[in-house]
Image: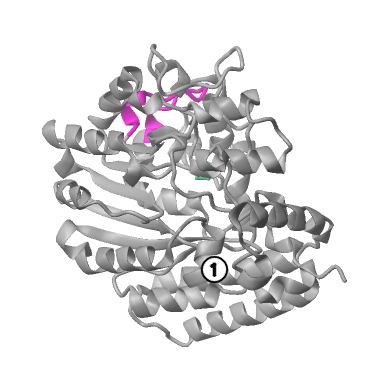
């Protein structure tokens, strides 16, 4: 390759060279941002998804036609179809996962480019970051989730899509168990020997016995001190055993998925109990330094149910969680009926005003204890959310939003008009 060709292009992302992402089903994808499109799974020549627990390992999958084409696209300045989420965020002025990853792994850039063959192949030896979703065992059934990520949602999906309980697709999701397979553990151990960053999510990783044994194995093999560990958790539980294991690693990063506080948190993330999560958040905040936890954030899925209450959640994080960085606000695109573009103009107007007030407060220097670039990032994201919400009218999906809400309310014994009075007019049929 010429030196010119070795230069990263404007669409280049380091992840397809150094990062292994495993989805809940065990299928390989380029990264967590490519989950929204079911077609964007790494596939073999026969079109079958490449699986992390394949007996033959991941060598062939790492350089499948899918992966090689993605790398070639990136080197040529094209936007790979699988990466539409990142480029959509960037077009809104939001700092994308691609931007963050290229900054985080900048030191691997030269090596990645140097080892790429003209057809886009790259050696597995460069994999140094693993992001593994350990199946779909979860104790919550968040309204915007699906049985792919939480098997607790199976009955809700049966009702939403009028499926029989023994529907083949539901049964398949109920039986995800690859995390315990020796083939997975073999591949994981091989990749982990070179890992500098391990990221676990679920399902709910802190619930899973395999999570404990995976961490114990890394400690026993002497790898833990070289590994930055990261978790995405709903923090409904916080086992003491985890603190004993976490402290053995180089560092810990925690992202806590939370979309609101108090009763609204319980409404969106049923059957979450807010006093328990509030307590666990404060324990984690207070003990962060003792477990080398240098990165703590809330991750907020911005959707119809919480867009009016984001200021409240950010204020809670500032006031109650002093060791947490700025909350990460992630726009929801699926399910489409929960996209904030669905809301009527008067609700969008109210949400825009509240978000603009929040951005103004941040611009004025509040809260003061976050790094300047984090505050700037949050302001940019808030502006992107306002723009996204007002840039399209998807009120055609309001009937579907009402249908989902009413089915979920009925199955959980909840009532949207009580939980979010400001959305009451949307459900007032008189
Ligand atoms: S560009 Fe975005 S979606 Fe594509 S691999 Fe990089 S981070 Fe993932």
Q: Position of residue 291 (x, y in %)?
A: 18, 57
- Could you say which quadrant of the image residue 390 lies in? bottom right
What residue span does the magenta drawing correspond to? 112-127
Q: Assess disc 1: are there few (<14), some (14-19) or many (≥20) residues with their C-alpha within 10 Å of its C-alpha.
A: some
Which element carries disc 1, helix, strand or loop?
A: helix
Is residue 69 at all visible to an observer of this figure? no
Residue 225, compared with residue 170, is above or below; it is below
Residue 253, compared with residue 216, is above or below; it is below
Is residue 59 at all visible to an observer of this figure? yes
Q: Residue at x 30, y 60 (%)?
A: 295
Q: Position of residue 371 (x, y in %)?
A: 35, 73
Identify residue for label 1.
Answer: 264
Q: Is residue 14 left or right of residue 78?
A: left
The residue nearer to you, when weighing 77 against 271, is: 271
Q: Position of residue 211 (x, y in %)?
A: 29, 38
**Outermost residue to the bottom:** 364
- How is the structure coloured here? one colour
């Amino acid at each position: 390759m010429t030196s010119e060709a070795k230069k990263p292009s404007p669409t280049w992302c380091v992840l397809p060279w150094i990062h292994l992402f495993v989805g809940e089903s065990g299928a390989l994808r380029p990264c967590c941002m490519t989950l929204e499109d079911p077609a964007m799974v790494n596939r073999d020549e026969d079109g079958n998804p490449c699986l992390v627990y394949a007996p033959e390992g991941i060598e062939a999958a790492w350089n499948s036609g899918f992966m090689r084409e993605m790398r070639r696209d990136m080197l040529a300045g094209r936007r790979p179809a699988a990466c539409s989420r990142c480029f959509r965020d960037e077009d809104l002025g939001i700092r994308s996962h691609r931007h963050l990853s290229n900054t985080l792994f900048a030191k691997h850039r030269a090596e990645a480019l140097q080892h790429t063959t003209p057809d886009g192949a790259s050696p597995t030896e460069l994999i140094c970051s693993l992001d593994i979703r350990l199946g779909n065992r979860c104790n919550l059934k968040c309204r915007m989730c699906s049985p792919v990520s939480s098997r607790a949602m199976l009955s809700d999906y049966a009702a939403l899509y009028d499926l029989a309980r023994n529907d083949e697709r539901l049964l398949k999701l109920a039986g995800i168990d690859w995390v315990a397979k020796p083939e997975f553990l073999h591949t994981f151990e091989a990749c982990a020997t070179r890992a500098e960053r391990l990221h676990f999510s679920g399902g709910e990783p802190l619930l899973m016995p395999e999570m404990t044994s995976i961490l114990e194995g890394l400690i026993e093999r002497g790898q833990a001190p070289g590994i930055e560990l990261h978790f995405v958790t709903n923090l409904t539980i916080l086992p003491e055993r985890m603190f004993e294991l976490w402290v053995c690693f180089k560092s810990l990063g925690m992202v806590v998925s939370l979309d609101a506080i108090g009763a609204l948190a319980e409404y969106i993330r049923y059957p979450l109990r807010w006093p328990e999560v509030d307590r666990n958040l404060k324990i984690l905040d207070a003990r962060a330094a003792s477990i080398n936890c240098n990165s703590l954030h809330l991750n907020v899925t911005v959707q119809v149910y919480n867009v009016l209450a984001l200021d409240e959640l950010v204020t809670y994080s500032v006031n109650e969680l002093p060791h947490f960085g700025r909350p990460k606000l992630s726009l929801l695109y699926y399910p489409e009926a929960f996209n904030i573009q669905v809301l009527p103009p008067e609700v969008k107007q109210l949400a825009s005003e509240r978000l603009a007030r929040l951005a103004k407060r941040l611009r004025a220097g509040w809260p003061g204890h976050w790094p300047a670039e984090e505050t700037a990032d949050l302001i940019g994201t808030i502006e992107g959310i306002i723009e996204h919400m007002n840039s399209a009218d998807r009120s055609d999906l309001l009937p579907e939003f009402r249908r989902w809400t009413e089915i979920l309310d009925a199955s959980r014994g909840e009532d949207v008009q009580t939980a979010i009075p400001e959305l009451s007019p949307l459900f007032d049929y008189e």
